[in-house]
Amino acid sequence: MKLLQDKVALVTGGSRGIGAAIAQRLAEQGASVAFTYLSSEEKAKKIEAGLAANGVKAKAYKSDAGNYAEAEALVGAVLADFGGLDILINNAGITRDNLMLRMSEEQWDEVIQTNLKSVFNLTKHALRPMMKNRGGSIINLSSIVGVTGNAGQANYAASKAGIIGFSKSIAKEMGSRNIRCNVIAPGFIETDMTGELDEKTKEAYLTNIPMKRLGKAGEVADVCVFLGSDMSGYISGQVISVCGALNC
């Protein structure tokens, strides 16, 4: 039997990068997968078809996770289409990097809205159906930067650090309802964004990573499978870093 057989999962930002890898791995392990996208419907439909090829139900939803009303409508649509919600993975995120002296209010607000308020929005609306189901797993994607900070990313680091405090609080509030909430803090992961970096910049990153390589999106997805499955039934309120020993 697959680890996530008969479970329903919702992944925000599931049309590219780490989010797409997470959606794929969940489907491979038997979960029916709903995921969100913001722009390319054509790309989202291709991913939807790829997920369904695993013999599970899959559906893409165009939705802005940072918008409270859209998040509420999204959860309602998922419940109507899939009949329940067992796993919520808050993955949607952006960067608007700048040194603090140059950072605009808009750059700050946009990152906080997308990265942190989205986690509040989706968690808020997912809790009642999870309580009705007498259980659930919420997995929030933070970042190693949310633990260590990083020059030029005060907005991003603040949003990702906020996710950690939020998740630990939800774990304490909802533990008696058998709803778990955990955090994954990826380090430097191979994505479209890191693929655009020049070799000199990549080498600079690698000198600080004890394992001397970038992580793979699938390695983050594997942790999502574990945290979404019954194998992690007594794990809640924790931060798991997927960083090649960068922060140990």
Image (tube, rainbow, N blue to C red):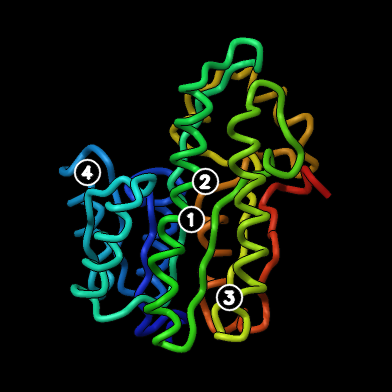
Label located before the other in sequence (3 or 4): 4
Pair 1/3: label in front: 1
**Vertical order, 19 against 157 (above or below):** below
Q: Which mark is residue 180?
A: 3
Label located before the other in sequence (1 or 3): 1
User: Which residue appears at 30% of the width and 65% of the height?
Assistant: 75
User: Which residue appears at 58% of the width and 69% of the height?
Assistant: 181
Pair 4/1: label in front: 1
Check disc 1 and report its element: helix, strand or loop.
helix
Confirm or deny contact between disc 2 and disc 3 (CB under 8 A).
Answer: no
Label located before the other in sequence (4 or 2): 4
Q: CA distance from mark 3 to mark 4?
A: 32 Å
How far from the left and from the top, in percent, is residue 22? 44, 58
Which residue, given by chain and number where applicable, does mark 4 sit on?
43
Which residue, given by chain and number where applicable, does mark 1 sit on?
120
Check disc 4 and report its element: helix, strand or loop.
helix
